[in-house]
Image (cartoon, rainbow, N blue to C red):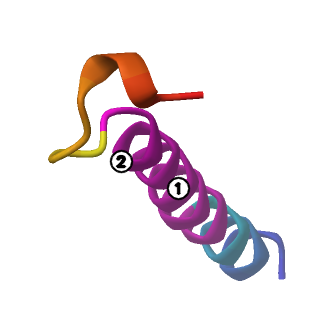
Amino acid sequence: QYLPNFVAVFLGNALGGAGFVGLMYFLAYRPGLPAGEQA
């Protein structure tokens, strides 16, 4: 019972964390915007 739950939690955290961090980087370094116009 521990191992399937651990795998599910690990995959959820890995995919969710990678997606969230990737989205933050994408928003921070969005192409097409001049560097001075970022908030």
User: For the residue labelled by badge 2, is the local secondary structure a helix, a strand or a loop?
Assistant: helix
Residue type at mark 2 is Phe
Image label count: 2
Residue on which the image places disc 1? 14
Local SS, label 1 = helix
Q: Is residue 33 above or below residue 15?
A: above
Which of the 4 image quadrants contains residue 16? bottom right
Quadrant for residue 12, please give it: bottom right
Give the left or right position of residue 39, taking residue 24 as reference: right
**Which amino acid lies under the numbered mark 1 shown in the image of this protein?**
Ala
Q: Which residues are magenta?
A: 11-29
Q: Which residue occupies 77% across, 77% down?
A: 5
Image coords of residue 17 (percent x, y): 58, 51
Of labels 1 and 2, earlier in sequence is 1
**Residue 26 numbered mark, or none:** 2
Work out how far the residue at label 1 is from the one at label 2, CA to CA, in angstroms: 18 Å
Which residue: 72% across, 68% down?
9
Magenta-colored stretch includes residue 27: yes
* Residue reaching furthest to the right: 1
At 83% across and 82% down in the image, what residue appears?
1
